[in-house]
Amino acid sequence: MKRIALAIALLLPLLAAAQNGISKKQSRYRLDALKRLEQTYHSLIGLYSGDLVVVGKDNRYGVVDLEGRTVIPLQYDQVVPALNGERFLLFSDTLMGIADRSGRMVVPLEYDYRLYADGVSDPFRYGLIVMSKGGKYGVLDSAGRTVVPMVYDVVWLVDSNLMILQGYDPQITQPYETLMQLDGDTVIPTHRYISWDEDLIYVQNNKKLWGLYDRSGRVVVACQYDHIDYLHNGLATVKKDGRTGVIDSRGREVIPVAEDRFGGKRPYPQTRNLFVLEKDGRIGAVDSLGNTVIPFEYDFNPEGSASHLVLVRGDTAYFLFDTTGRLVCTYDNIDWDSECELSEPQLLFAVCRNGLWGLVDTAWREVAPCIYKGADFVDGHHWLMRLDENNSCLIDEQGQVLFKGPYRFAYPFGDGIWRVETGAYGGDIVLGGYVDAYGQTTLDCKTLRTMKRRMREFAKMSEAFQD
């Protein structure tokens, strides 16, 4: 039995890498290529499409292949990959353009450097990108063709067919917004403000009253509320004349505003019969009739996921409840990426019990037991877990240990490869290299020994700080 367990443990990194479609030999080739590139360039930003690397030298950036051949010259202030490396956004001085993976300019370097309304996190969402030229915004497709001309003050993409346009009316001295199809047909006429979530469009009229439309432009809720929260689990809090109620995604008042069962306070709906509420500076939960389900003895509510609710007492006590308000378990701490809420579709959270860390998924099922001495976020699929004062290990959403070593930090680099580093102390420089899902690395034995020593130093510094 022990032999079988050992064989499975040895196979886990192989299986993890194989799931990425990358053989051990291919991955070794990429690691060796990255090590060579490090000798030429001051920084390697990321690996994209399997063979393209964004590189930097003397504060200029470009793209090379794994053989070191230049694809995009090192002449830009910034290079941002998109479409998994099929496109690259190029920024220089006050202008930006777009090149494809061959280095051919798809969009000339003549658009405004002030980026685009949608930001850089997902620049080709829906296969489209919002761009600015001459202070006006429009939309291009991934081939660089103009879909919406550059004539608008602001453009936000709602989906592949809808956009919100913002203008300014000098007569009423306020901005206005309109929901339109990309072909120019108006879906929702001009309102003071328009926003959206996955299913519905939120609008505010000139009287500052809120309503809801669906994406076809049909009125779901006429503009009548002073405030409408975004939907959570199909429910949203509404407020009118100082009273609060709850509506569903069809606009029906499942808890009428007129009855004001929450005493004018703003409830956070977890289910149709469980609502988080603040009372006298404390957090608890009530049912649809206003009866207390979870006592008002907590300090903070970081919302929770669709399946569970998290309440916090003090700084070191996190309480997990199910959708009926039943206490499931407690933790000393819960950690997640600072850019994500617990309700976002992040795959893994780190949890701490009795001073030791583990991992749970978004349904709060245990992925890795609470046996680790620390946890550091890598991405939604991986966490770097501290084994002891010398080593950490990278764990994926299946609970598999992909590799371990004297690493203080890990960053996803691309295609099953991670950048690993130790910190710098005093006059030391940061030491680092690359590791793949097979555990292969670019680090030599001497560097690994130095990194292990630094890990011990960091552990002692942390203990001294805690004391």
Image (cartoon, helix red, strand yellow):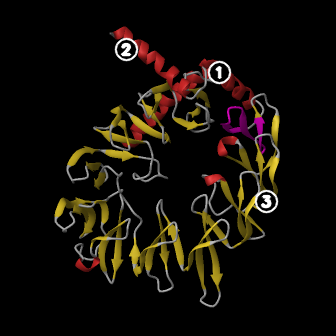
Precedes in sequence: disc 2 or disc 1: 2
* Residue position marked by numbered label 1 in the rendering: 28
Quarter of the view holding residue 134 = bottom right
Q: Residue 44 in magenta?
A: yes
Residue at disc 2, secondary structure: helix
Of the residues shown, which amino acid type is indicated by label 3? Answer: Leu
Q: Is residue 365 left or right of residue 118?
A: left
Q: Which residue sits at x=57%, y=25%?
A: 450
* Residue position marked by numbered label 3 in the rendering: 95
Picture layout, residue 240 above or below residue 195: below
- Magenta extent: 43-64
Q: Which residue sits at x=43%, y=33%?
A: 385
Question: Residue 235, how many percent across, how many down?
Answer: 34, 63
Whether residue 373 is visible to the viewer of this picture, yes or no, is yes
Q: Residue 62 in magenta?
A: yes
* Residue position marked by numbered label 2 in the rendering: 5
Asked if the residue at tag 1 contacts the one at tag 3, i.e. Cβ–Cβ closer than 8 Å, the answer is no
Precedes in sequence: disc 3 or disc 1: 1
